[in-house]
């Protein structure tokens, strides 16, 4: 099929359609965080079960991401984007009608499959149709849509839960989704870059088995025992299939996920840094709502209002980051961003049961400001050297790694939170606390601090990769001069 000329694409109509889709897909994640406690109460379930409304969703995002390149080449990225949005709206409706925690988890997992196609397709469209000189700004607009969702998501979630019910967290996606579908159909042109290839079924099966095995082992290891036969078997199966997937994809003539993009040094190191930043970000979005509602007994509405300022700062900083990126460069923007993330995360390790709203807002704002600069820099730096024909696969790889990393982060943080809470309860009980009634609250707070400390160390781990970014930049510049 012929490729439509995309040289004269109008910037704002395309970005408007992209904005709606990215906003709505992330909104589907951010509204759920505030509702976890409500799900536990309404469905009489434990956090280890309820967390699968998040981890199952995130796992689906990671599993389907490798398919994006194949589907985009076969049907065109506009078509994939359009039908992904239709599926997202349909299963949002079904989530709203869920009759139990099991049905909600199943519908969320399927909803995640459609959602997982949205972000990589929108990123691919940006790097395939937007002029190169405007791509950093386009990425910042794309990032703004993704940041506005968690900014308003908790507040919207709290209002809907308090005034209506948790079901409206999903029903609200339907009218917004219909608007997004119309924008996609009208504003994004039909085009094709690349040609359809045969579906790599073996690669798809291996990545599904490896991702699911590792996530289940990480999520259930605390309950089953980390040295139990089930846990160890899942880790071994997941590791074997992951290694097999990588070997197969590197040798396949028509791979499901073209891992050869890792041959681009700049892409590889920025992806590692970006994934670490994403994992660190999830610590705040998961832990703070649980702390505010379980320890300080705040309503969902007030929880959302406390999270709002920090998320707004993160959202508003994204366009600024996109504008200054060409002048400052990826390395220094990422270093500044990581410094803010590390500082803010470390301060969040000192929370107490009576910590003030201002304390939480201040240090969450510092963290989120850092996320804006670091995420914008690493996202753009990793993709800008990838050719148009490989952008779809690079975008798929990016979202696969980030989403799988995010799902592992949620499972890890939830497991650490539960296990450390039990440990702290035993320690405080043994030491003879003055007020036994406060032991559960104090233990939970101490566990939240522990997990934030882990998130701080994770953010520190991104620094070495950030320092290597300039090497590729210098090589590319020298090659351009020589040419």
Image: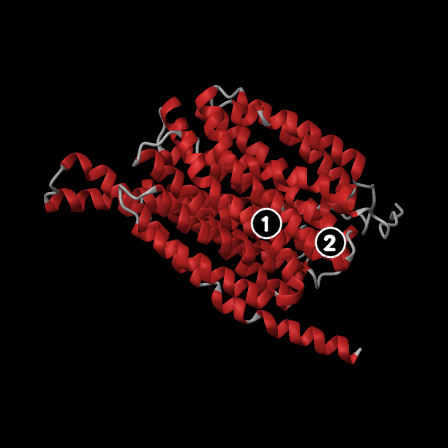
- In the image, is residue 452 above or below residue 381? above
Is 94 displayed left or right of 18 in the figure?
left
Using the image as rendered, state which of residue 381 and residue 269 is in the foreground: 381
User: Is 245 or 425 nearer to us in this picture?
Assistant: 425
Residue 263 lies, in percent from the top left, at 65, 66
Residue at the image point whose x is 29% and y is 46% from the top: 447
Task: Determine crowd level at label 1: few under 14, some 14-19, many 20+ residues with C-alpha closer than 10 A.
Answer: many
Residues 366 and 50: in front is: 366
Q: Is residue 248 above or below residue 335?
A: above
Q: Answer yes or no: is residue 103 visible.
A: yes
Name which residue lies at 53% across and 49% down: 314
The answer to whether 322 is drawn above or below residue 414 in the figure is: below
- Asked whether the viewer can see residue 221, the reply is no
How far apart are the alpha carbons under marks 1 and 2?
18 Å
Q: Which mark is residue 127?
A: 2
Nearer-N-terminus badge (1/2): 2
Q: Secondary structure at mark 2?
A: helix
Residue 33 in percent (x, y) is at: 45, 36
Q: Is residue 280 left or right of residue 127?
A: left
Left or right of residue 23: residue 198: right
Q: Residue at x 67, y 76 (%)?
A: 475
Image quarter of the N terminus: top right
Q: Is residue 299 left or right of residue 441?
A: right
Q: Are marks 1 and 2 in contact (CB under 8 Å)?
A: no
Q: Which one is in front in this view, the residue at disc 1 or the one at disc 2?
A: 2
Residue at the image position 45 percent from the left and 49 percent from the top? 365
Which sits in the foreground, 257 or 283?
Answer: 283
- What is the x, y in percent for residue 134? 74, 56
Number of marks in the rendered image: 2
Residue 400 — which label? 1
The picture quadrant where one finds residue 52 is top left
Residue 74 at x, y percent in the picture: 78, 44
């Amino acid at each position: 099929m012929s490729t439509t000329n995309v040289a004269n694409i109008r910037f704002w109509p395309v970005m408007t359609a992209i904005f709606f889709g990215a906003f709505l897909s992330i909104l589907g994640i951010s509204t759920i965080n505030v509702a976890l406690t409500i799900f536990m109460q309404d469905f009489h379930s434990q956090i280890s079960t309820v967390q699968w409304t998040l981890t199952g969703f995130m796992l689906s995002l990671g599993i389907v991401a490798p398919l994006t390149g194949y589907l985009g080449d076969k049907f065109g990225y506009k078509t994939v984007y359009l039908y992904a949005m239709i599926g997202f709206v349909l299963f949002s409706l079904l989530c709203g009608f869920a009759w139990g925690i099991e049905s909600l988890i199943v519908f969320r997992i399927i909803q995640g499959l459609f959602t997982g196609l949205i972000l990589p397709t929108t990123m691919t469209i940006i790097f395939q149709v937007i002029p190169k000189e405007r791509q950093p700004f386009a990425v910042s607009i794309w990032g703004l849509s993704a940041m506005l969702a968690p900014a308003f998501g908790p507040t919207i979630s709290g209002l809907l839960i308090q005034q209506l019910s948790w079901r409206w967290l999903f029903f609200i996606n339907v009218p917004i989704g219909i608007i997004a579908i119309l924008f996609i159909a009208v504003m994004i042109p039909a085009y094709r870059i690349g040609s359809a290839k045969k579906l790599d079924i073996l690669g798809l099966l291996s990545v599904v088995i490896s991702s699911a095995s590792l996530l289940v082992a990480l999520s259930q290891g605390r309950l089953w025992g980390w040295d139990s036969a089930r846990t160890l078997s899942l880790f071994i199966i997941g590791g074997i299939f992951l290694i097999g997937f990588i070997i197969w994809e590197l040798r396949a003539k028509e791979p499901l996920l073209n891992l050869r993009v890792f041959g681009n040094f700049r892409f590889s190191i920025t992806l590692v840094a970006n994934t670490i930043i994403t994992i660190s970000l999830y610590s705040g979005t998961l832990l703070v709502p649980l702390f505010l509602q379980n320890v300080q007994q705040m309503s969902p509405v007030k929880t959302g209002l406390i999270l709002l300022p920090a998320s707004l700062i993160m959202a508003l900083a994204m366009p600024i980051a996109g504008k200054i990126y060409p002048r400052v460069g990826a390395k220094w923007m990422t270093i500044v961003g990581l410094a803010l993330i590390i500082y803010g995360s470390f301060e969040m390790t000192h929370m107490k049961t009576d910590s003030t709203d201002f304390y939480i807002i201040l240090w969450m704002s510092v963290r989120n400001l850092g996320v804006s600069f670091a995420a914008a820099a690493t996202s753009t730096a990793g993709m800008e050297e990838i050719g148009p024909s490989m952008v779809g696969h690079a975008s798929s790889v990016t979202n696969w790694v980030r989403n799988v990393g995010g799902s592992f982060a949620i499972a890890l943080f939830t497991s650490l939170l539960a296990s450390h809470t039990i440990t702290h309860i035993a320690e405080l009980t043994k030491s003879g606390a003055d007020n036994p009634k406060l032991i559960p609250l104090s233990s939970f707070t101490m566990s939240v601090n522990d997990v934030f400390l882990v998130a701080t160390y994770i953010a520190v781990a991104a620094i070495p990769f950030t320092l290597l970014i300039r090497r590729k930049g210098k090589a590319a510049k020298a090659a351009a001069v020589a040419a």
